[in-house]
Image: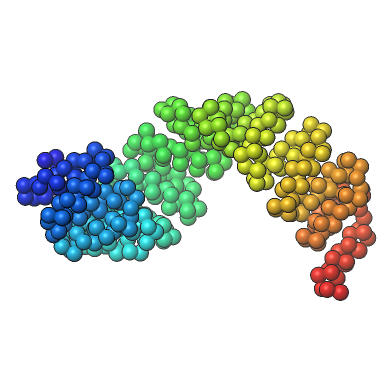
């Protein structure tokens, strides 16, 4: 029988159902594996290996609560079954029960110290927000298994959560030194560099990722974003269009395409891309805001008003009110301008300072008018 650390065979000559179940599990036939483990348990209800392997299959198929039950039965028979303790910890972790997960890992570590269990315990502490404890554990795991690429990647996630981007970057560099082809880590590193403001370096990392996997959606979207911020609008557009060829409903790619086309001066094409994005995500205020701005550039003030009104209905703000006021002013509709200024004041009377400092709005409104409106608003709030 094949030896597999995930599905260890019985020490005695294997029973056909147990052996068959292990082989099927290795092949990915989980339904068949479970059927054979259950047959084995029907014949021998005290076989901890059958309960354990059944628990592993349930864990891998997302049946975490059922996995816990099976692993608990294995541990009733063999309380020091270290692999079952670790698997039980993983099941608790998948269910978000991190404290129970740590208890299982501690029991396993009391039997034998190993990097995998320490690594998993570190992840549980990370998910509980215990970042310093998580780092201590992950560093220990890295000392024991310096070639395990997952460990420095996990350390980077912890540093990121602690808002220590430089330490996160160093951890990712160690990770990529172990495996330069680790796509998830390469993507994380590129995103981190971008957020740190190193867009040129981020673009280089996206290109490295895409060199090995040209259709990596995360890499293409990231490259498009970095190229857009660097002013490489055609390069950004090419990346976003590659995404859309595979995922025509990817909102972020439509939005990115629209922005790139707008910067390239292709306003009609840009508007069409914004329209697609709005159709796919009608409640997104950023898309409507950008489309409204483009419509204004295209002298479509009425269309711009429609988008801003739609935003105001779901997310009223002083900013939107003042934008609507300015647009109505451009259309020569002073009463509407004053109405939107008053709505802005009702949201926040401190908006008066912004209005007076605004070169355009201040030509329609003076301090006395604002003070009267603020006085009326305050009286209304007091119920007078």
Relative to 184, is 380 above or below?
below
Q: Position of residue 231 (x, y in %)?
A: 63, 30
Number of marks in picture: 0
> Residue at 34% across / 45% down in the picture?
150
> Residue at 29% across / 64% down in the picture?
103
214 lies left or right of 367: left
363 lies left or right of 7: right
Q: Position of residue 157 (x, y in %)?
A: 43, 49
Relative to 18, is 217 above or below?
above
Residue 280 visible: yes
Q: 122 and 95: which one is in front?
A: 95
User: Split into 4 quadrants, where in the image is the C terminus?
Assistant: bottom right
Image color mode: rainbow
Q: 11 and 249: which one is in front?
A: 249
> Residue at 23% across / 43% down in the picture?
32
111 lies left or right of 255: left
Q: Position of residue 105 (x, y in %)?
A: 27, 60
Q: Quadrant of residue 52?
A: bottom left
């Amino acid at each position: 029988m094949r030896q597999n650390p995930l599905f260890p065979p019985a020490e005695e000559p294997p029973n056909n159902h147990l052996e068959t179940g292990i082989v099927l599990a290795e092949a990915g036939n989980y339904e068949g594996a479970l059927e054979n483990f259950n047959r084995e348990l029907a014949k021998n209800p005290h076989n901890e290996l059958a309960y354990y392997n059944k628990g592993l299959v349930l864990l891998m198929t997302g049946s975490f609560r059922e996995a816990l039950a099976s692993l608990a039965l294995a541990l009733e028979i063999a309380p020091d079954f270290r692999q079952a303790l670790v698997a039980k910890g993983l099941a608790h972790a998948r269910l978000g029960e991190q404290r129970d997960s740590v208890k299982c890992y501690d029991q396993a570590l009391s039997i034998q110290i190993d990097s995998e269990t320490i690594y998993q315990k570190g992840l549980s502490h990370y998910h509980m927000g215990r970042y310093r404890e998580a780092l201590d554990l992950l560093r220990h795991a890295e000392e024991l298994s310096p070639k395990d690429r997952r460990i420095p990647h996990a350390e980077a996630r912890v540093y990121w959560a602690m808002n220590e981007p430089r330490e996160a970057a160093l951890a990712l560099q160690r990770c990529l030194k172990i495996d330069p082809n680790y796509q998830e880590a390469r993507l994380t590193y590129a995103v981190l560099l971008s957020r740190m403001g190193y867009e040129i370096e981020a673009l280089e990392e996206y290109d490295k990722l895409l060199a090995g996997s040209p259709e990596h959606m995360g890499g293409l979207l990231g490259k498009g974003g970095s190229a857009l911020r660097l002013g490489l609008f055609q390069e950004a557009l090419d990346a976003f269009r590659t995404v859309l060829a595979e995922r025509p409903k990817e909102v972020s790619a439509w939005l990115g395409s629209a922005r790139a086309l707008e910067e390239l001066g292709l306003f009609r094409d840009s508007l069409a891309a914004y329209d697609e994005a709005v159709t796919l995500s009608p409640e997104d205020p950023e898309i409507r805001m950008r489309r409204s701005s483009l419509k204004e550039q295209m002298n479509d003030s009425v269309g711009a008003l429609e988008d801003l009104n739609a935003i105001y209905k779901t997310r009223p703000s002083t900013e939107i009110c003042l934008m609507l006021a300015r647009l109505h002013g451009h259309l020569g509709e002073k009463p509407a301008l004053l109405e939107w200024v008053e709505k802005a004041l009702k949201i926040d009377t401190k908006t008066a300072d912004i209005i007076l400092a605004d070169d355009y709005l201040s030509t329609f409104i003076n301090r006395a008018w604002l003070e009267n409106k603020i006085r009326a608003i305050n009286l209304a709030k007091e119920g007078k």
